[in-house]
Amino acid sequence: MNFKEKFSAIVAKNNSLVCIGLDSELAKLPEHLKSADNPQFEFNKAIIDATADLVCAYKPNMAFYEAEGVKGMESLKKTIAYIPKHIPVILDAKRGDIDNTSRLYAQACFEYLGADAVTVHGYMGTDTVKPFLEYADKAIFVLVKTSNPSAVEFEDLPGEEGNPNYLRMAELVAGWGRLFPGTAGAVVGATYPDDLLPIREILPEAPLLIPGLGKQGGDAEKTVKNGMNARKVGILVNNSRGIIFASEADDFADAAREKAQAFRDMLNQLR
Amino acid sequence: MNFKEKFSAIVAKNNSLVCIGLDSELAKLPEHLKSADNPQFEFNKAIIDATADLVCAYKPNMAFYEAEGVKGMESLKKTIAYIPKHIPVILDAKRGDIDNTSRLYAQACFEYLGADAVTVHGYMGTDTVKPFLEYADKAIFVLVKTSNPSAVEFEDLPGEEGNPNYLRMAELVAGWGRLFPGTAGAVVGATYPDDLLPIREILPEAPLLIPGLGKQGGDAEKTVKNGMNARKVGILVNNSRGIIFASEADDFADAAREKAQAFRDMLNQLR
């Protein structure tokens, strides 16, 4: 089953557009877990057990595991292996390098760690994303318009015809999707919901990974309306800290479930 | 000692503009090393022992270690710890993410792994590179014009005034250098040596990390002439596979030393 089929199946099964970001920063985990052999994995395991019927994807953020070195990588690998096979795993790694290097990153993300998709930088062009695209059953999400405040500094710079850089990046992504059907999606921040419309026009079918609705405070209604494709699907709305750190106490998994359910229902009402 | 001072000192001491890229792909290592506990580290150790008096920096490429998982990260950490303290280590990681994530990547690269500098993507703007810049004694090298063939697809797209994107990225880097003196450099490929001139104009003092002269076949003379600053320094010319894989046999370290020496002398003749 390729990424697109896996993604369509889970959206239908769980009736959900929610992607939970596993930004499981060690310092923020409940105290009683910190003495475990793999605290980040134990934390993620509890979150996954509590939310697996509510999500369309999980998105572990590589940085939070890399920061813990060898132990962190162990936790990340175990986490991905633990996620039920019918739920897509998007590794938020934001990789992008020349071809022989991207090939190794692809190997690390897809083969060693076992992710279904990875976020990538498109700045360096086709040959840097091709090694990822060549995995026919996997997918990439290219950074088009990111959710952070400084995104406007470069991504919004206008080209000769006035089109901002993020739309020119979206056009590259559209080209990659034609070369490798079903494997090229885009990252678009919910903090710039008006920008979703022209991006969706350029990418009518691509899955859009949308961060920025949790702690970053994006506009939910505009995000869902502007981001969905014609069949009212095609978006993965991410929430990381707003769900996984809903409670700092022993009830963290229950609290995460409650937040995830509320987030799912809220998004579904806007569809 | 901050990065700039360390870099100036080693260029003078070793009379070298050579940065050796430790792209130590496991599959390419000599057979007799593959049974070692940390083959990538053993390989790097031999290369470092053979070349430490000939370089101005080492640049391990993160992908080649990540691809080997936990073992690879062990090798990378040991390699960086083994490199003599007076030689700068640039971790080629091409990171770039929103602020709370970049903070963790900076922690992983600078604190856990102990690198002196890291390569980063600037596409997402200031808040994504600031966590790296806040380490006053460390440095970043921002991808401005990369060495790969597809670099032109996005990096060369013209803006409203006709200036290509890579020059607009160079202007951002110049701004970061003003905010955080001595910490913002740029990556510029030797495969586009004419583009070094306008980039050097925008960044008169920044260190330029220049890949593309080894296997990728850039123009050495133009690269050195166009890349150097007014004091005939300020460039780190990278060579990875051309040096470290000069021989596949047991004499690989000697062969690397020979290539490194020839590469250093060739660059110095062009200064």
Image (cartoon, coloured by chain):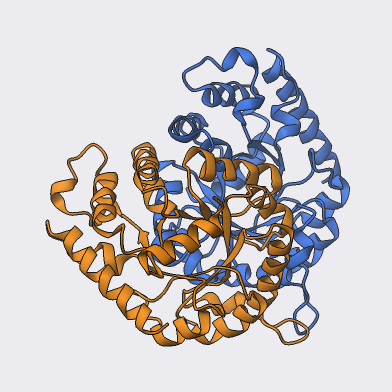
Chain colours: A orange, B blue
Q: Position of residue A211 (x, y in %)?
A: 44, 71
Q: Which image quadrant is residue B63 in?
A: top right
Residue A219 visible within the image: no
Residue at the image position 39 percent from the left and 83 percent from the top: A220
On the picture, is A131 further left or further right than B157? left
Q: Nearer the viewer, residue B28 or B209?
A: B28
Q: Position of residue B8 (x, y in %)?
A: 61, 47
Q: Position of residue B118 (x, y in %)?
A: 54, 51
Q: Is the residue A56 above or below the residue A266 in the image?
A: above
Q: Point out the image quarter for the C terminus of chain A.
A: bottom left
Q: Is the residue A160 above or below the residue A92 in the image?
A: below
Residue at the image position 73 percent from the left and 53 percent from the top: A127
Q: Which image quadrant is residue A183 in?
A: bottom right
On the picture, is B180 further left or further right than B54? left
On the picture, is A76 further left or further right than B124? left
Q: Is the residue A269 above or below the residue B262 in the image?
A: below
Q: Nearer the viewer, residue B72 or A92?
A: A92
Residue at the image position 23 percent from the left and 57 percent from the top: A50
Q: Nearer the viewer, residue B41 or A262?
A: A262
Q: Which image quadrant is residue B55 in?
A: top right
Q: Position of residue A162 (x, y in %)?
A: 72, 87
Residue B244 visible within the image: yes
Q: Is the residue B179 above or below the residue B253 in the image?
A: below
